């Protein structure tokens, strides 16, 4: 699978008109230069979506040479934001062709490429695993950048427990100013915000390749398609305890549940009222959480429903859904952020960490 990427380079020391003029002179198409809004940041250079190949990396190198030529530099307020596409390229699309088309579309329309270039987006389970692996080794990633990017309000670290508790993409969307931002999901990307600003092409490219490997390793070595089971705990009490529906819920969420007659005796309600409250409880906690025992299943004859029909709210229930699932323990790939990374890139990053320590 080939995932795409986009880069936003924040700079200072050169004005937007200066950078735009230099890019035109160098005949570099497809990238835009806009204000960023962060204090002490003069410009943000937004590249079009690219796919990893020599063409893409040469494109980044040309842009960096232009930025350096006009005196653009970075300070501690500048960041480097990398967007990884949430869907791989369609199998028939080559990275080089994609880059050419993407640059042309951006230059001619001001828009980003969409639609026919991409396969289906990655599953929630894959996104959750990517975020889990990144956050699990957050302290290691902190050492890969200057201290100004650790605990930075524009790229705050995520909560591992909240990631693990999430059940959908919405619950993984914690806000823009986090190390990983999913507010861009509807636009087709996952944004990684922690990298420090730079106009050095090797630093940009090596961070992009690190993230692409992180995403690829999850999707090829840790996740597989199929059916997954989700276990959900029911709340102890989602209603007011003294209310009739709250009492009904407590009775139903007990060992063996409660019969219609028992609920009628405890609440003074009619049989129809009990059915309506059971329906309300189903709406609140989910159909799968409520089990109805008919008079026949309870060993009674038809017509004895008031006495023998019972309702139980399960303490926990399972639901299954089509989609990806993590591979079993004996097959799943290493969770390390370094897993699958080339020896060359692994060595570059560890040398980078040592340089920052010194």
Image (cartoon, rainbow, N blue to C red):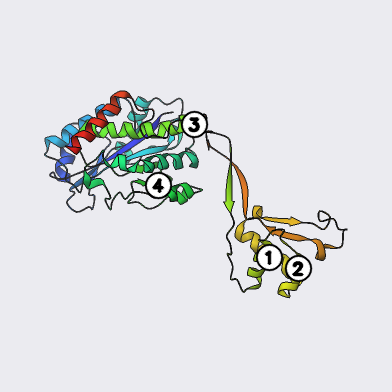
Residue 182: give its label.
4
SS of the residue under disc 4: loop
Horizontal side, residue 239 vs residue 117: left or right: right
Residue 332: give its label.
3
Q: Position of residue 304 (x, y in %)?
A: 85, 63
Q: Which residue is mark 2?
A: 262
Residue 225 lies, with reference to residue 150, above or below; the image says above
SS of the residue under disc 2: helix
142 or 183: nearer the viewer:
142
Q: Is residue 49 visible?
A: no
Q: Position of residue 115 (x, y in %)?
A: 45, 37
- What is the quadrant of residue 276 in the picture? bottom right
- What is the quadrant of residue 338 in the picture? top left
Q: CA distance from mark 1 to mark 2?
A: 9 Å
Marks 1/2 in contact by CB < 8 Å: the verdict is: yes
Q: CA distance from mark 4 to mark 1?
A: 41 Å
Q: Earlier in the sequence, mark 3 or mark 1?
A: 1
Q: Earlier in the sequence, mark 2 or mark 4?
A: 4
Q: Earlier in the sequence, mark 4 or mark 3?
A: 4
Badge 3 density bin: few <14, some 14–19, many ≥20, Cα 10 Å:
some
Residue in view at x 20 percent, y 30 percent: 62
Residue 251: give its label.
1
């Amino acid at each position: 699978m080939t995932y795409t990427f986009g880069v936003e380079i924040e700079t200072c020391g050169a004005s937007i008109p200066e950078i735009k003029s230099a890019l035109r002179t160098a005949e570099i198409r497809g990238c835009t230069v806009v204000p960023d809004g962060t204090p002490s940041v003069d410009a943000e250079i937004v590249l079009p979506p690219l796919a990893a190949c020599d063409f893409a990396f040469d494109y980044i190198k040309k842009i960096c040479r232009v930025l350096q030529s006009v005196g653009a530099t970075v300070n501690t307020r500048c960041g480097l934001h990398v967007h990884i596409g949430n869907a791989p390229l369609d199998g028939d699309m080559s990275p080089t062709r994609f880059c050419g088309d993407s640059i042309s579309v951006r230059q001619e329309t001001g828009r980003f490429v969409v639609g026919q270039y991409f396969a289906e987006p990655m599953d929630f389970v894959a996104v959750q695993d990517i975020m889990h692996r990144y956050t699990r080794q957050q302290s290691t990633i902190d050492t890969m950048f200057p201290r100004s990017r650790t605990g930075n309000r524009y790229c705050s670290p995520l909560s591992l427990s909240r990631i693990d508790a999430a059940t959908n993409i919405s619950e993984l969307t914690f806000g823009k100013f986090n190390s990983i931002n999913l507010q861009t999901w509807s636009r087709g990307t996952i944004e990684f915000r922690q990298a420090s600003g730079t106009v050095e092409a090797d630093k940009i490219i090596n961070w992009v390749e690190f993230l692409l490997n992180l995403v690829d390793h999850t999707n090829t070595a840790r996740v597989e398609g199929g059916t997954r089971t989700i276990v959900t705990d029911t709340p102890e009490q989602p209603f007011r305890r003294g209310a009739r529906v709250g009492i009904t819920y407590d009775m139903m969420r007990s060992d063996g549940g409660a019969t219609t007659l028992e609920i009628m005796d405890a609440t003074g309600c009619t049989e129809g009222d009990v059915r309506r409250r059971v329906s309300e409880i189903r709406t609140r906690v989910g159909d799968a959480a409520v089990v109805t025992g008919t008079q026949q299943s309870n060993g009674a004859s038809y017509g004895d429903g008031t006495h023998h029909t019972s309702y139980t709210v399960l303490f926990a229930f399972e639901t299954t859904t089509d989609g990806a699932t993590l591979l079993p323990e004996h097959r799943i790939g290493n969770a390390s952020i370094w897993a699958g990374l080339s020896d060359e890139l692994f060595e570059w990053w560890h040398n980078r960490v040592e340089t920052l320590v010194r």
